[in-house]
Amino acid sequence: MSEFERPSPTIEDYLGVIFTLARDGERVIGARLSESLDVSAPTVTATLKRMERDGWIFISADKEISLTE
């Protein structure tokens, strides 16, 4: 991820929900994102894979999602 790269509006939405859930002490997992963003589980999975590849998030072995620095 380049320091000048801006996330797409969709990625911004995901980042916002991830941030809010984490801030509120919630466990951040795909199912919560699916509910919060009102999108299907397969769509969330595909988007999260792209976000992880691009360096926006980290997905732990137990599928918990966190923002990168």
Image (tube, rainbow, N blue to C red):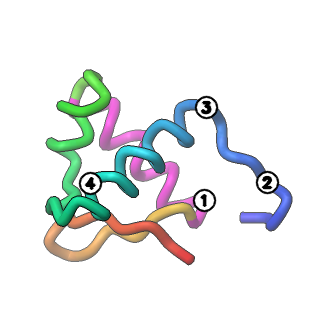
Query: Which of 13 and 61 lies nearest the eye of the viewer?
Result: 13
Label 3: which residue?
Answer: 9
Q: Are marks 3 and 4 in contact (CB under 8 Å)?
A: no
Q: Of the residues tagged 1 and 2, which is closer to the observer?
A: 2
Horizontal side of residue 16 vs 5, given as left or right:
left
Q: Of the residues tagged 3 and 1, which is closer to the observer?
A: 3
Q: Are marks 4 and 2 in contact (CB under 8 Å)?
A: no
Main SS, magenta residues = helix
- Residue type indicated by callout 3: Pro
Q: Of the residues tagged 3 and 4, which is closer to the observer?
A: 4
Mark 1 nearby-residue class (10 Å; few <14, some 14–19, many ≥20): few
Query: Which of 20 and 32 lies nearest the eye of the viewer?
Result: 20
**Going from the N terminus, do you reach mark 3 or mark 4 first?**
3
The x and y percentages for residue 57 are 46, 64
- Residue type indicated by callout 1: Asp
**Going from the N terminus, do you reach mark 3 or mark 1 first?**
3
Disc 4 on helix, strand or loop? helix
Quadrant where the C terminus is found in the figure: bottom right
Label 4: which residue?
Answer: 21
Disc 3 on helix, strand or loop? helix
The x and y percentages for residue 42 are 26, 32
- Residue type indicated by callout 2: Glu
Reply above or below: 38 against 32. Answer: above
Q: Residue at x 26, y 54 (%)?
A: 21
Label 1: which residue?
Answer: 54
Mark 3 nearby-residue class (10 Å; few <14, some 14–19, many ≥20): few
